[in-house]
Amino acid sequence: MKKVLSIVAVAALSAAFVSCGPSKEELAAKQKQTEDSIAAVAQAQADSLAKVAEAEAAVAAEAAAKVAADSARVADSLAKATPAKGGKKH
């Protein structure tokens, strides 16, 4: 009698344990949610890197413009400071 009762108890507990688990649909939904989350993080990372690249390009362009303006300013000041060729001969 004890063996039968033990077998019935084990069977009932096993059935309860298996029936309380997630269904295939729930597992698939959770997997899809995880994949969507990973994709969203990857997209956010790519967007962030693109913004950084744009900012670096803007800084480089600004620096190049400043260098060109400084070069022109120095050339103008040198042109004013040096006498022109072909002036009076002594």
Image (cartoon, rainbow, N blue to C red):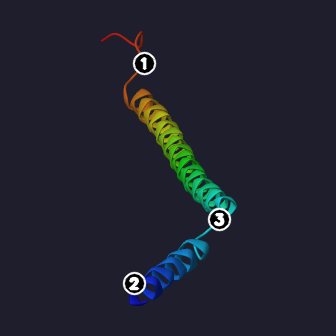
Q: Nearer the viewer, residue 37 or 55?
A: 37
Q: Residue 77: x and y, percent?
A: 43, 35
Closest to the observer: 60 or 72? 60
Whole-number angstrom distance, CA of label 1 to CA of label 2: 118 Å
CA gap, disc 3 and disc 2: 32 Å
Give the number of the disc on residue 3: 2
Locate the C terminus by quadrant. Answer: top left
In front: label 1 or label 2: 2
Answer with left or right where residue 37 lies relative to residue 89. Answer: right
Determine the residue located farthest toward the left in the rendered image: 90
Residue projecting furthest to the front: 1
Q: Secondary structure at mark 1?
A: loop
Q: Nearer the viewer, mark 3 or mark 2?
A: 2
Q: Nearer the viewer, residue 81 or 63?
A: 63
Residue type (three-letter) at the residue carrying disc 2: Lys
Crowdedness near tag 3: few (<14), some (14–19) or many (≥20) residues, C-alpha within 10 Å: few
- Residue at (61, 61) in percent of width and height: 27
Mark count: 3
> For the residue labelled by badge 3, is the local secondary structure a helix, a strand or a loop?
loop
Which image quadrant is residue 19 in? bottom right
The amino acid type, in three-letter code, at marker 1 is: Ala
N-terminal of the pair, mark 3 or mark 2, is 2
Nearest to the eye among marks 1 and 3: give it.
3
For mark 2, does the 10 Å Cα neighbourhood hold few (<14), some (14 to 19), or many (20 or more) residues? few
**Which quarter shows the N terminus?**
bottom left
| Disc on the earlier residue, 1 or 3 | 3
Give me the residue at 56% from left, 75% from top.
Answer: 15
Q: Which mark is residue 23?
A: 3
Q: Which mark is residue 31?
A: none
Residue 84 is marked as: 1
Real-space Cα separation, disc 1 to disc 3, in angstroms:
92 Å
Residue drawn 69% across and 60% down?
25
